[in-house]
């Protein structure tokens, strides 16, 4: 967020935490306690044995309260998602496993980007209608449908492009820059869906 000059709070790890840049403070979701952390450690160990060690994917480093797996060469995101779901089937309904455009996310059940952005709104007193969101995966729709402005880069999943207010003609980071520039120059009043989908 600092790279784009944004110093407002935001969600991290798919809604599992809030980031407050003014104090460089990170707050975990209230439902994440010792039992969730223990279950997450057990899930990580299981995924390591059944997914990472066999060479299907690798963990994204630095995650504290969720897990993200990226596929290795020769493994599709879909195959990685299925392998992770199979590996965690013995963990009951403790986790949500979602595939995105490029990875597989494992979060504690009941926490997603939608719950995260609602929590962010409650904590900051910023109405959801005054927030913007950019996403590329179907799991992002949970928060993109809640915020006042929604957009996606050109490489977003088709269902995301169909469900947001603006689709950039650019992919990845260039798309984010385009979206932020567009939002900076356009007023927010009186629009439910932006032109350019």
Image (spheres, helix red, strand yellow):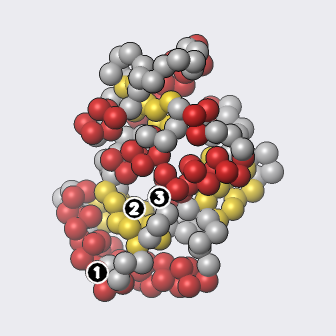
32 or 40, nearer to the observer: 32
Give the SS element for disc 1. Answer: helix
Residue under label 1: 89
What quarter of the picture does the C terminus occupy?
top left
Foreground label between 1 and 3? 3
Q: Quadrant of residue 164?
A: top left
What quarter of the picture does the N terminus occupy?
top right
Q: Residues within 10 Å of mark 1 (few under 14, many from 20)?
A: few
Q: Residues within 10 Å of mark 3 (few under 14, many from 20)?
A: many
Spatial CA span between label 3 and label 2: 10 Å
Q: Earlier in the sequence, mark 1 or mark 3?
A: 1
- Return the mark for residue 27: none
Vertical arrangement, residue 5 with respect to residue 109, above or below? above
Q: Are marks 1 and 3 in contact (CB under 8 Å)?
A: no
Q: Earlier in the sequence, mark 3 or mark 2?
A: 2
Residue found at x 34% / y 35%: 163
Residue found at x 72% / y 44%: 125
Residue under label 2: 105
- Return the mark for residue 112: 3
């Amino acid at each position: 967020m600092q790279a784009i000059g944004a110093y407002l709070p935001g969600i991290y790890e798919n809604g599992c935490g809030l980031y407050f840049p003014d104090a460089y403070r990170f707050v975990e979701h209230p439902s994440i306690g010792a039992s969730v952390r223990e279950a997450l450690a057990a899930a990580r160990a299981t995924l390591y044995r059944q997914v990472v060690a066999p060479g299907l994917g690798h963990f994204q480093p630095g995650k504290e309260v969720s897990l993200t797996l990226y596929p290795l060469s020769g493994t599709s995101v879909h195959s990685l998602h299925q392998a992770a779901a199979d590996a965690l089937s013995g963990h009951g309904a403790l986790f949500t496993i979602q595939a995105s455009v490029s990875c597989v996310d494992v979060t504690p059940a009941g926490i997603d980007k939608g719950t995260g952005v609602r929590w962010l709104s409650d904590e900051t007193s910023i109405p959801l209608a005054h927030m913007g969101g950019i996403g590329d995966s179907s799991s992002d729709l949970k928060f993109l449908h809640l915020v006042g402005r929604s957009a996606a880069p050109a490489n977003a999943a088709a269902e995301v492009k169909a469900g947001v207010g603006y689709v950039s003609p650019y992919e990845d980071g260039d798309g984010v820059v385009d979206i932020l520039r567009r939002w900076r120059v356009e007023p927010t009043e009186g629009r439910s869906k932006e032109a350019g989908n």
